[in-house]
Amino acid sequence: MPARSSPPLVTGVSPKEGPPGTRITIRGENLGYDNNDLIGLKICGVDCLLSSEWKSPSKIIARTGPGKGKGDVIVITKSGGQGSCTVGFKGYFVQIGPLQESAIWIEESQNVMSNMRHGRPQSPLFSKDDEDPLGIADEGSHAKFTEEELAEIFPESSGNMSLENFSSSWYLLENHHNTGFEDLKAGLAHMKRRATQRSEGPIAFVKSNLSSTLDCLDSLEAMYEKYCSDDIRGQSINSYAVLLMQAKSCADGLFQEVLGRKDKADSTRNALSVLQRFRFLFYLPLHIERNIQKGDYNLVINDYVRARSLFADTQVQVFRKVYTEVESRVNSFREMLQNKLYELPNTLEEQKKLIRYLNNLECPGEPAWECLINQQKWLLTILHMCKDRHIEEEMRNIQNDPGNLLHSPGYNKFRTPQKVSFIEELTELVTDNFPDLWKLGQAFFSGSLFTKESGEKTFKVDAVKHSKFKQMITGIIAVFANLVRASFLPESLENIPPEERAQYGVWQSAKQDISGAWLPICVRYIRNCVSSLTQLDLPGDSPSLVTDLALDMRTNCMLTLLKQAIADVQQLHTKETWTVETDDESGGTTQLPALFENIVNETIQHLHEVVVQNKPGEPEIFSQRTVQKDATILCTQLLQAFAPCLNCLAFTPPPVTNNKTLSRPNRSSDPNSDVSEEGVLPLDKRLIIMLSNCSHTMERVLPRLVENLNKLGYVEMNKALKTAELTYQELDDKLFEAYVEEKSNPIVGTMEQNMYSGKFDWKACKKPYGIRNYLKEVIMQMIEVHAEVFAVSPSFVTRVTKNVIEAVAEEMSRLVECITEFSPNGVLQARLEVLALQETVQLYQTPHASECFQEALDALPAIKQDDKRIVEELLNKFKSQMKIQLMCFYSDSLLL
């Protein structure tokens, strides 16, 4: 027998509270040497020795008895006697419901009878008065919040846990307002532990109460053996069995409805558990519908692929039913994607996405190839529809235009021609849609539309489809080029079959209905479109089709604009106002040379920007010999076109409406002073003005124009300059000859008549006293010619004056040679007049004029020395009297 030791001391209990049957661990000192040394264990005054299990001198495990309230844990051993404790255990009773498991016997008689008398069932989980859900000890006599105070703080809440408006704050203030934070944390752990125990189910309950269960079985076995030993006749057991069966039947009858509801709840719980476990599949139809509406197609496809890998081969009827619904939704989704793929126009990125979606959904067929075919057909259709719509609109305009205003120049300035609108829309359609078709085809044949996320390609190029796609591309380009040619270059389609030619439409208006103001716009549309197409690296004949089209349109535009410019120059005579402007460089000219130069410069500059200047990949327009030749011819004609205009104005001018003269002071006279009633200048003034315009054009305008043409790349322009100079030189000679004749004939025609006016006779001439009036009149007429020419163009003064003087000298020589007999005074008078005329025009004398004057002097008889002095004096007198008038015939040195 072991020696006597110190009394047992309990220093710790875990848990510190619980209902009857709670498994607790007791720790302390001197708790016994072994299981036999332990002879007693009281918890809250209840003996719990039978449920105890000695582990070590410092540890005992036991189950609590039906003790209530807080009490001590006392251990009794043989070696140490009755012990003490420093901690306690709080026991409480749980009100067990009719469906709740319990490891101890529950006295139900009072509750059941009370409930039956009042006609209501009772199934609370616990009694509010006896149990705290946190398992915390009562706070004793500490002051608590009254119910009125709590109702004021929480007006719409309650501290009753059985009500819907239960407030945890109310409950804590009402029951634990002085409890510390650590105790509240322990209470929370206790509440979680109890919830875990309830959720573990019957198996967990049996495990936690295994000793009680075994005790019950042992007790029943002992009871049965006792009954059998006391039942001598053997009838009591049977009667007991009958009574138990009847009690069971009665209990089943009482609880059948409740148990049925429990079974139904269990089945519902199981169903919910299955739904929760496989909620992905059950919610998938709804998620597919919602994600489709939101446009999150990637999520739809990922969910479907996952569901297909998990449930495609399932044999569970419920799963198969749901998966069938998923397949139905996905089939509708495929159809929607296919419809969106075939709806055009659409962006390239959107088409690629749709094709990838369909490939991931394993759509039957080849969505990418079908999309290419559909897009090719659609593009051809809209091109032809564009052509048909504009041709119909043109026909409608022609029918509604009885006055043929559509083809008048003024009308086209304000209304866009139908062909221009057609080209604008056609090129826009091709530029916006064709690159997407080409790029989609490249993506299809490169396999990028079929590349998995891992980078593995799942597509092989089909050579037949690749060849067919090239034919599709070439066909679209050919249709586009021929539609343009049919509208602007119909003669280029004369060699194709009539049936094919009819497909491209027949425009009612001729090629010339597009003025020079609109044609460059069309060329710009075509060149921009062709530039975007050539950047795509098109296959086969497609590049040559579009580049040839652009070159032909450029050539047509250049030739048309040059012809238009020629026509505009030829109409310049209608814009002449006969307003002469003078400057130091060009003398006096009207506005026509400047207008001519502006028309040519604007035309060639416009052509350079729109036609001549090459874009990357375009051929040089002058590399074609025929184009070079035609351009040279038209440029030559353009330079020559101004000459007929000047000729027309000089000889057959249209009436003028503006007779305002603009000239610099002291350098011009008014050429419009002799305007006729029809608003036309006299012939001589028209001749000198046009002569000045012609000279200015030939000497200054033409060289500048040719220099500009050479800079812009036009060929053989020096040859064109020589040809044009010949034309203007011929016109200059013609105008000069006509003007000299126009100005000299009146002077020469009146000399003889005026010489013999007043029945003058050389044989009966009086002593000369000065120059006669007829010669003064001749000199004044020459001064008038000099002034008129000087006012328009000083550079022509010498040229015109010399020719006029030659004509006058010839006439003077003829008149003198025709005199048959002179008196002495007549000889002096004739010599005086010849010498006066000769010295007056000495500055402008030509060799021919000098010869004529000399012949006239030689025809006169010789005179004496005294007579020579008389002639000299009279000649000096004449010079002195007409000094001012004769200044125009003297040089600056003679004037000084």
Image: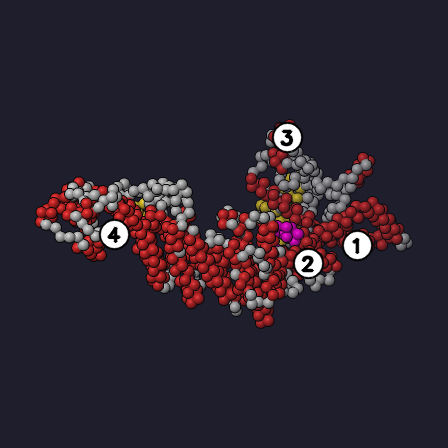
Give the mark nearer the N terminus: 4 vs 1. Answer: 1
**SS under mark 1:** helix
Give the label, 3 or 4, closer to the camera.
Answer: 4
Q: Quadrant of residue 16?
A: top right
Give the mark nearer the N terminus: 2 vs 1. Answer: 1
Q: Residues within 10 Å of mark 4 (few under 14, many from 20)?
A: many
Amino acid tagged 4: Glu
Residue behind mark 3:
155
List x then y, in percent, for residue 860. 17, 52
The disc label shown at residue 811, or none: 4
Amino acid tagged 2: Asn
Give the mark nearer the N terminus: 2 vs 4. Answer: 2
Give the label, 2 or 1, closer to the camera.
Answer: 2
**SS under mark 4:** helix
**SS under mark 2:** helix
Residue behind mark 2:
331
Amino acid tagged 3: Pro
**SS under mark 3:** loop
Separation of residues labelled 4 and 1 (CA atoms): 178 Å
Residue in front for this viewpoint, 84 or 447: 447
List x then y, in percent, for residue 113. 81, 38
Give the label, 3 or 1, closer to the camera.
Answer: 3
Separation of residues labelled 3 and 4 (CA atoms): 141 Å
The reply to whether the C-beta atoms of the residues labelled 3 and 2 are less than 8 Å apart is no
Residue 363 appears left or right of 217: left
Q: Residue furthest bottom?
A: 463
Amino acid tagged 1: Glu
